[in-house]
Image: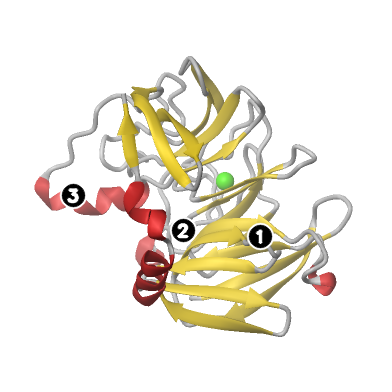
Amino acid sequence: MSRTNLLMDGDRVIQEGGWQTLFTASPLLCPEPDEFWLSQRSGGNMAGYDDDFLLVSVGDYAFDGTRVPDYSFAKDTTVVYGKFILVNKRSGEHHIYASGIRNSQGLLIDPDGTIWSTDHGQGGGDELNLIVEGHNYGWPESTLSIGYEEEEWPYSEFQGRHNLHEKPVFGWAQAIAPTDLLKIGGDKFPHWSGDLIVATLADESLRRLRLDSDNRVIYDERIELGHRVRDLLTLPDGSIGMITDDMVFIVIEDGGAVFEPLDSLHQERYYALDGYNNFTVKN
Ligand SMILES: [Ca+2]
């Protein structure tokens, strides 16, 4: 993680100074050429925690007991992989916030301080977690997952059951591959107010989760999109924007969705925003 200063100068954005490295995940991992797939287990995200800190998630790069026998990153409290890390935005000082994470791509901090996160299981067993400081979220000892191809997961005492450590709030037995998530606020979607929206890859959908006052999930509605959705954001007018792996920008409004190829959108914005060229570096 690195930081830099951006300043507005009229309608231009100016970078002041260079980049300062705040946080580097360690130890350095050097995958073999045939281990490109490891990056698929690097899942991470970040969110503003308070005025001073960012909360960051880092995946376990498949060090789950299988690559190095009986050793897993997510359990080892001396490494940052398979963890949530709290990082000071100015000094880079950091510490482990929560552990037992496999490949967590969704992270949302509610205004009331509730921290929601999604985690990819393997062979199913995807999770929605409510993150609390100091808690262990189970991986790889305790999981709803089984092994790929329906083999048993050797590190779980109770196959397909999350009996140890912090349990997920909700799980998906069949893999949906959850990525980003957001919570519906404002008045744009009055019938969805307070619901969590989870984006998915394998399921090519959004999942709308209704919560009760105890943060239990009451139901899970599947909204078919036909695209692998990587990123979600609340747009200024309250509608939901999302970016897909096949470069489509989708906007969900009350009553429908608009699909637009990201390339054309870029072009349009490029021509519309004269200042796009005027990004300058001031040392
Ligand atoms: Ca878990």
Of 150 and 124, which appears nearest the observer?
A: 124
Q: Is residue 268 left or right of residue 107?
A: left
- How many angstroms separate mark 3 from mark 1 (CA)? 40 Å
Please give the count of numbered marks on the rendered protein: 3
Check the image and name the residue furthest to the left. 33
From the top left corner, tell me how far across and down residue 267 is, in percent: 35, 71
Residue type highlighted by circle 1: Pro
Circles 3 and 2: CB distance less than 8 Å? no
Q: Which residue is mark 1?
A: 236
Q: Is residue 7 left or right of residue 181?
A: left
Please state the horizontal and vertical placement of residue 158, each as a whole percent of the image.
56, 49
As helix, strand or loop, the secondary structure at mark 1 comes to: loop
Q: Is residue 61 above or below residue 1?
A: below
Q: Is residue 205 visible?
A: yes
Instruction: Specify the quadrant of the image occupied by residue 15.
Output: top left
* Res 255 quadrant in image: bottom right
Q: Earlier in the sequence, mark 3 or mark 2?
A: 3
Q: Which mark is residue 135?
A: none
Q: Position of residue 38 (x, y in %)?
A: 27, 48
Instruction: Write the residue at 44% across / 45% down.
Output: 12
Residue 98 in sight in this render: no
Mark 3 vs mark 1: which is more N-terminal?
3
Identify the residue position indicated by label 2 in the image: 146
Q: Quadrant of residue 97?
A: top right
